[in-house]
Amino acid sequence: MDALKLNEMRTGDRGIIERITGTGRFRQRLMEMGFVPGAEIIVEKYAPLKDPIEYVLKGYHVSLRHEEAERVLVRGVEEEEKED
């Protein structure tokens, strides 16, 4: 499966972080919060107007704006992988 942007996933979807695009302080901040390659992330819910989006990452909840989530590339987890 090809990498997709985190903001393209739907509520309940799971993914594995592939990479964070861009450079600078925001990218560093995301990585400090646990957005690192190989980490599993779950889309918890979208706000009523679709912004921000709440995720579960490493056991805690974090919200990102739509344009911030666009910088995170993920690989979707297939159903068989979820059950393992």
Image (cartoon, grey):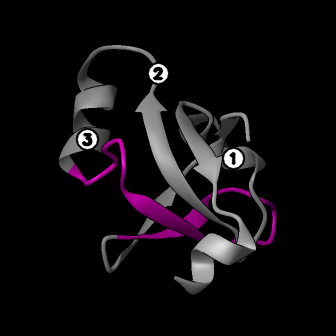
Determine whether the residue tagged by mark 1 lies in a helix, strand or loop: helix
Q: Which residue is mark 1?
A: 7
Question: Can you give x and y, in whole percent of width and height, for residue 2 in the image?
Answer: 72, 34
Q: Specify whether residue 41 is in view.
A: yes
Q: Is residue 60 above or below residue 64?
A: below
Q: Which sits earlier in the primary sequence, circle 1 or circle 3?
A: 1
Is 34 in the magenta? yes
Q: Which sits earlier in the primary sequence, circle 2 or circle 3?
A: 2
How would you rate the neighbour count of disc 1 (Cα within 10 Å): few for under 14, some for 14-19, many for 20 or more?
many
Q: Is residue 82 above or below residue 72?
A: below
Q: Which residue is mark 2?
A: 21
How would you rate the neighbour count of disc 3 (Cα within 10 Å): few for under 14, some for 14-19, many for 20 or more?
some
Query: Which quadrant of the figure contains the N terminus?
Result: top right
Residue at image position (60%, 78%) is: 82
Question: Can you give x and y, in whole percent of width and height, for residue 76 in the image?
Answer: 66, 54
C-alpha separation, residue under disc 1 versus residue under disc 3:
17 Å
Q: Specify whether residue 45 is in view.
A: no
Would residue 14 be found to the left or right of residue 17 on screen?
right
**Mark carried by residue 39:** none
Residue at image position (47%, 21%) is: 21
C-alpha separation, residue under disc 1 versus residue under disc 2:
13 Å
Q: Which sits earlier in the primary sequence, circle 1 or circle 2?
A: 1
Question: Can you give x and y, in whole percent of width and height, for residue 28 in the image?
Answer: 23, 30
Q: Nearer the viewer, residue 79 or 27?
A: 79
Chain part drawn in magenta:
33-57
Q: Which residue is mark 3?
A: 31
Question: Cβ–Cβ below 8 Å for labels 1 and 3?
Answer: no
State the residue lying farthest toward the left: 32
Q: Amino acid at mark 1?
A: Asn
Determine whether the residue tagged by mark 2 lies in a helix, strand or loop: loop
Q: Amino acid at mark 2?
A: Thr
Q: Nearer the viewer, residue 18 or 68?
A: 18
